[in-house]
Amino acid sequence: MVATSYSAFSLLRHALTGHRHWPRTWRDPEPKEHYDVVIIGGGGHGLATAYYLATRHGIRNVAVLEKSWLGGGNSGRNTQVSRSNYFYPESGAFYEHSLRLFEGLARELDFNVMFSQRGILSICHSAHEMEIYRRWANAIRMNGIDSRLLSRDEVRQRVPQLNLDCRFPVTGGFIQERGGISRHDAVAWGYARKASAAGVDILQRCEVQGMESSDSRVTAVRTNRGRISADRFALCVAGHSSQLAAMAGLQLPIVTIPLQALVTEPVRPVFDTVMMSARIHVYVSQSDRGEIVIGGGADLYNSYAQRGSLNTQLDTLAALVELLPMFSRLRMMRHWAGACDMAYDVSPIVGKTPVENLYVSTGWGTGGYKAIPAGGDTLAWTIVHDRPHELLRPFQLDRFSSGRLIDEGAASGVAH
Ligand SMILES: Cc1cc2nc3c(=O)[nH]c(=O)nc-3n(C[C@H](O)[C@H](O)[C@H](O)COP(=O)(O)OP(=O)(O)OC[C@H]3O[C@@H](n4cnc5c(N)ncnc54)[C@H](O)[C@@H]3O)c2cc1C
């Protein structure tokens, strides 16, 4: 099956018949008994992995098992920020690869993912914080990634609405101009559409409820749609990683915490960058639909709930109106949370596991949306070659026994 090409011509052609004859975006097949690779979790990472397996490596007998709907987990709940301004070279190389894939993603998937590189501005509130930002921005530049320090006046020019003399006066900031936002559903749908066209079976409402193992290998998964066996399995289930890994007898160094976000009613374009304050714990952008998208710190307790606590929400809103008082008159439209998979060093764990044919993509925590293209690309490579992709070597499970942790807590932009 070949996906219909999306073009001005096809739009016009379908307009003539009232848009009633567009084909399904992806197929809705019945599960087969056996696949070469079964990917558990139909979020961005699972779908991207399936897409790259099928299109870059010719492995098409692949299934993605999703217990609810595609992108219904964190991939459709996030605030859509993509950037590569991480401190450590290992993270910089990985996230820069992802940002570059994002830059060509709409063309590659023939799906408008609305990637808008409007700049990611991190502001700071003291001379001391400015010193830390100077070190951070320089480290990013040494990683070969664009990053620029901004004085207080330059921040004012960039965001004229900002209340620089708020309770925590703004002293400056730094910006990655190539960072930006995209449409998160479109990223999941775009990968799903092309993966399905390449032969991948996408099975929604298919929950993995148990695993069968023999000789330290997983042989099959038990789902509400029947037993499915495979040669290799990959876990891409974010906040549910510990539960799924436990089914294979594996314990992961992951905890699950809720992270929430809010959007206001839509308004005309008024805010043309992404601004974050790690000190006051708020970050904000305006979506292409006009909503002001607001994120804050994580709830600091373990939970699988997809709703956040009121106190974090109130703290986030207090920070927002302190920095951007003009937003105080907007009405909130929606509020939700996602279950984030956090490793102790706030870096991902992607690669092989002690279970021979089980691979894992987890620990994305509060920042794995930006990683979807590179996560899928490198995990697919790892599955095919049965060894970690070059960019993934630092992000293996063994770092928790060797002590080579990559502490990116400060770079996450979100307080944990
Ligand atoms: C509020 C919020 C804001 C965020 N903002 C950003 C941001 O601005 N930038 C950024 O880079 N990152 C952000 N993130 C993090 C980012 O969303 C995640 O790291 C990323 O989406 C993880 O993708 P995933 O594919 O691993 O997981 P998910 O998208 O969560 O997909 C996992 C899927 O597994 C399925 N699943 C679970 N258990 C089973 C089972 N037993 N059987 C079958 N399927 C199962 C789930 O239903 C789910 O669909 C944010 C997260 C949240 C919650």
Image (cartoon, helix red, strand yellow):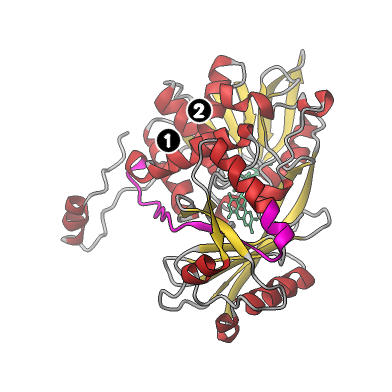
**Where residue 339 appears, x then y in whole percent?**
71, 53
For residue 35, say whether it is visible: no
Q: Is 211 inside the magenta-drawn segment?
A: no
**Where residue 360 appears, x then y in whole percent?**
67, 30
Q: Is residue 306 above or below residue 32?
A: below
Numbered disc 2: secondary structure: strand
Q: Is residue 30 above or below residue 308?
A: above
Viewer-nearest of labels 1 and 2? Answer: 1
> What type is the residue that disc 2 sits on?
Val
**Where residue 198 appears, x then y in whole percent?**
38, 31
- Can you say which quadrant of the picture contains the N terminus? top left
Looking at the image, which residue is at 80% across and 41% down? 344
Q: Is 117 inside the magenta-drawn segment?
A: yes
Q: Which residue is mark 2?
A: 62
Question: Label 2 CB, ligand 1: below 8 Å?
Answer: no
Looking at the image, which residue is at 70% across and 26% down? 396
> What type is the residue that disc 1 sits on?
Ala
Please tell me the numbered disc located at residue 281.
none
Please state the extent of the stretch shown in magenta in the rendering.
Answer: 109-131
Q: Which residue is mark 1?
A: 195
Q: 141 or 4: nearer the eye?
A: 141
Looking at the image, which residue is at 64% across and 74% down? 320
- Can you say which quadrant of the picture contains the C terminus? bottom right
**Where residue 272 appears, x then y in whole percent?**
44, 67
Q: 135 or 407: nearer the eye?
A: 135
Give left or right: position of 345 versus 156. Answer: right
